[in-house]
Image (cartoon, helix red, strand yellow):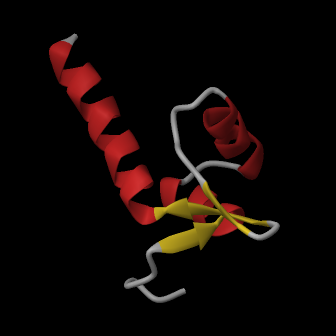
Amino acid sequence: MSSEDLLLPIPEAARRLGLGRSKLYELIACGDIETVRIGRAVRVPVAALVEYVERLRSAASAA
């Protein structure tokens, strides 16, 4: 995968977050991370991963 990719397959998105696929699917199911569907393919926007990490950092600094 190129660092310029805008959309990532689930396994690659999980790897970039350092999580397992199952955990990423949980985060997607509860709405914490958005996905896009192109035909039958489900992809995670890189921007959605960045937003998720920023929310985690904001919550940690607010606590």
> Height in image: 49 above or below 3?
above
Could you say where residue 22 lies in the image, as x and y percent from the top left? Answer: 77, 43
Q: Which residue is drawn at 44% across and 75% down?
A: 6
Query: Residue most toward the left?
Result: 62
Q: Which residue lies furthest to the front in this view?
A: 39
Q: Residue at x 33, y 45 (%)?
A: 51
User: Which of 22 and 29 lies nearest the eye of the viewer?
Assistant: 29
Q: Which residue is outermost to the bottom?
A: 2
Residue 3 is situated, as x and y percent measured from the top left of the image, at 39, 83
Direction from residue 60 to residue 62 in the image, left or right: left
Q: Please say if 62 is above or below 38.
A: above
- Above or below residue 11? Residue 27 is above
The quarter holding residue 13 reads bottom right
Q: Which residue is drawn at 27% across and 40% down?
A: 54
**Could you tell me which residue is drawn at 61 percent across and 48 percent down?**
19
> To which quarter of the image does residue 44 belong?
bottom right
Image quarter (top left, top right, bottom left or bottom right) of the N terminus: bottom right
Q: How many labels does the image show?
A: 0
Residue furthest out toward the top? 63
Q: In this view, does 26 lie above or below 48?
A: above
Q: Is residue 14 left or right of residue 32?
A: right
Could you say where residue 12 lies in the image, as x and y percent from the top left?
62, 68
In the picture, which quadrant includes the C terminus?
A: top left
